[in-house]
Image: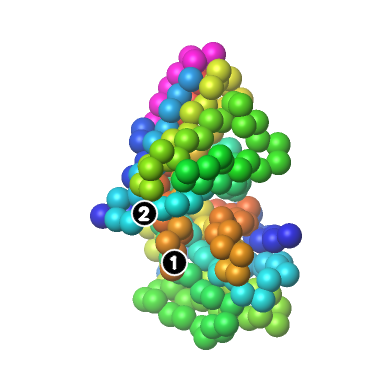
């Protein structure tokens, strides 16, 4: 079964609205989770590192005020895309590392219309 | 800085052919992990293999095999007797091991199309 659960798998929202994506580690505690973004036919790029109990760290070029990350517990990280624009339409996928592997969620396909 | 290069953007083969997907990496770390993932059209990443930098043994799992060569910084993936179900995008990835920063650096991916 899935070790990391990500919801929703697909979402369509209107421009200007906010969308929240949840990432849960089911079988283990994750003090760190990663959020990646994948544009069509491109690779996965790390957006930010979610840290339980402290602020997230963002990769260069990623707007922290637009992509709000909250690591509320050892099993849950959320990514909120605020004031979404069509150019935010992408595939977002989270990852929770264990000692031996990087477990990925199922991904969320976001379409902003 | 880390970098993963998958020079083959797209490969098309006919079923039952063997195919090799290339992966070349760059890192300054002496300890690191290498991965291969399969991404079908649904988008989810399917884990295929993880290899640490101290283990250069080749690995075989069914029709899949991997060739890790530190001398050339390569970690190539071969599918033997390809099948239509192998059609997907395949990503090679690298992560550090020493610093605890375990985010993956992905290559650009290779789209494999297996024709019946």
Dot 2 falls on which chain? A
Look at 51% across and 35% down and name the residue there: A69
Residue A98 found in image quarter: bottom left
Which color scheme is applied? Answer: rainbow
State the count of labels.
2
- Viewed as shown, does residue B72 lie left or right of A77? right
Boundaries of the magenta span: A10-17
Residue at (63%, 53%) from the top-left corner?
Answer: B108
- Relative side of A53 to A1, left or right: right
Element carrying mark 2: loop
Residue B4: give x, y in percent of width and height: 66, 61
Q: Mark 1 points at which residue?
A: A99
Q: Which residue of the protein is positioned furthest toward the left in this rendering?
A: A1
Q: How crowded is mark 1: few (under 14 residues within 10 Å), some or many (20 or more)?
A: few
Residue B69 appears in the rendering = yes
Residue B78 seen by the camera? no
| x then y, percent, for residue B15 | 43, 64
Instruction: Residue at the far front: name it.
Output: A53
Q: Residue at x 54, y 83 (%)?
A: B55
Q: Does the stretch in magenta take in A15?
A: yes
For this rendering, which residue is in front, A109 or A27?
A27
Which comes sooner in the sequence, label 1 or label 2? 2
Residue A29 image label: 2
Tell me residue A14's x, y (percent): 48, 14
Report in which chain the residue with disc 1 lies.
Answer: A
Is A89 placed above or below B82 here? Answer: above
Q: Quadrant of residue A3?
A: bottom left
Same chain check for tags 1 and 2: yes
Q: Was residue B37 drawn as part of the magenta stretch in this picture?
A: no
Q: Residue A21 carries which label?
A: none
């Amino acid at each position: 079964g899935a070790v990391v659960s990500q919801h929703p798998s697909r979402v369509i929202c209107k421009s200007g609205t906010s969308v929240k994506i949840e990432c849960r580690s089911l079988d283990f505690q994750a003090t760190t989770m990663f959020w990646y973004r994948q544009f069509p036919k491109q690779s996965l790029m790390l957006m930010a590192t979610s840290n339980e109990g402290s602020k997230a760290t963002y990769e260069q070029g990623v707007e922290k005020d637009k992509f709000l990350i909250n690591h509320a517990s050892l099993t849950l990280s959320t990514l909120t895309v605020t004031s979404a624009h069509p150019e935010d339409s992408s595939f977002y996928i989270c990852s929770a590392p264990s000692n031996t592997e990087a477990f990925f969620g199922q991904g969320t396909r976001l379409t902003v219309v | 800085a880390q970098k993963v290069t998958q020079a083959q953007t797209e490969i098309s083969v006919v079923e039952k052919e063997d195919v090799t997907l290339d992966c070349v990496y760059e890192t300054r770390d002496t300890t690191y992990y290498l991965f291969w993932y399969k991404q079908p059209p649904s988008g989810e990443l399917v884990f295929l293999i993880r290899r640490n930098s101290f283990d250069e043994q080749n690995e075989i799992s069914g029709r899949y095999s991997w060739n890790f060569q530190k001398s050339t910084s390569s970690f190539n993936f071969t599918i033997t007797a390809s099948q239509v179900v192998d059609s997907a995008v395949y990503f090679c990835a690298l992560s550090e091991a020493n610093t605890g920063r375990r985010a993956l650096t992905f290559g650009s991916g290779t789209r494999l199309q297996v024709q019946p």
